Amino acid sequence: MAISRIKTSSILQGFPKSRSVLAGNTAFRPEYLAVGHGASPFGTVYDFDSTSGFGSKYANPASNFSTGNGYSIDFNSAGTQIMIVNGNTPFVAAWPWSASGFGTRHADPATLSVQGDAGEFNPAGNAVAYGSYGGAQVYAYAFSSSGFGSKFSDPAGIQGTNGTRATWNPAGTYIAIGASASPYINVYNWSSGFSTRISNPATLPTGYGAFVQFNRDGTNLAVAHSTSPRITVYPWTTIFGTKYANPATLPTGDGSGAHWNPANDVIAVSHDTSPYISVYPWSSGFGTKYADPGTLPAGTRQGVEFNRLGTSIAIPGATAPRIVAYPWSNATGFGTKYTDPVTAPTGTAYGVSFG
């Protein structure tokens, strides 16, 4: 089945809530889980805890999340801003964020893009970028506590058609953008804007590049895509390295998302055919696939993400309850599915983010 407009989100990096408990000598704070989805209010944020799962839903912002499908949602690294990329004008929106939830929505960018896809804040929090269907294929803006600044100049020499997800490496020195046509991925040097485009990898992904992500130390770059093997991973330095061997057990459907755990020793891939999620140990390549969860997600999945402790994994999708989450252990894999949230996302869930 060919991928068509599969959306995912980037890592949500919000501050935990102010309440905390002590676990040994380490202060553990509850988390957030945010979901972008396809019906009003187009985004939902929950309190979340790795022990009990979904907690209370935050109140919606006074100004609606967006005017169209919420294709990605992201916090800046300081946890003081939240952004959503959506399918209708103005295509991107942002709010201040605190433990109380949403503040007053920032003014829209002065120069609007065309239809947005998925993206994120850069690690420094002073820029945002996202793929787009049409136009320049990727749009980037300066950002501050006051909101959107000027649009950065479009990148030169972008290849393929229709930008999908845009993401930075952890150092903020490279930006990768998925594409719906060959070469299915573009990577640029980044320094206060787009710089030189990096040469394509020797072995290209085999289909629609729905999702791209660097791992947590920036040494690998993954592309979830249509067409077997559906997940392609490259070593990364300043250029693409030689593609890693495919996993022995391939994902069963077109890839829609890929995410490493915080320790970089597990990689998860979401896809559009049962069991909808495939997770592998990672050590300079794919290990033996973990057993499927006892309770499978229902229907096509649009993304996947580990929480920042590596103790939970969440998977958004098209079928109710649209967002499912499980405890995670590297030793045993999936735990028993968490109870679904009391208030489910409205419409297809396109992306999930932990903070």
Image (tube, rainbow, N blue to C red):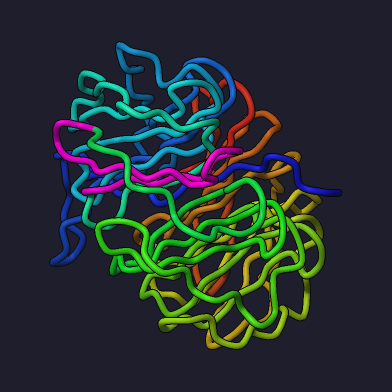
Q: What segment is highlighted magenta in the picture?
A: 126-147
Question: Horizontal and vertical percent for residue 50?
Answer: 39, 50
Task: Please name the residue shown 71% across and 55% down the image.
Answer: 181
Task: Please name the residue shown 58% across and 48% down the image.
Answer: 164
Q: Is residue 94 left or right of residue 96?
A: right
Question: Horizontal and vertical percent for residue 126?
Answer: 21, 48
Task: Please name the residue shown 32% across and 48% down the image.
Answer: 121
Residue 354 visible to the viewer: no
Q: Is residue 271 left or right of residue 140?
A: right
The image quarter containing residue 347 is top right
Q: Is residue 271 left or right of residue 331?
A: right
Is 141 colored magenta in this rendering? yes
Q: Residue furthest top?
A: 62
The image quarter containing residue 87 is top right
Question: Horizontal and vertical percent for residue 186?
Answer: 54, 63
The image quarter containing residue 93 is top left
Query: What secondary structure prevails in the magenta region?
Result: strand
Residue 260 visible to the viewer: yes
Out of 129 and 300, give the one closest to the viewer: 129
Q: Is residue 131 above or below residue 109?
A: below
Q: Is residue 194 above or below residue 108?
A: below
Question: Horizontal and vertical percent for residue 106?
Answer: 24, 23
Task: Please name the residue shown 57% across and 60% down the image.
Answer: 258
Q: How many marks?
A: 0
Q: Is residue 150 above or below residue 278?
A: above
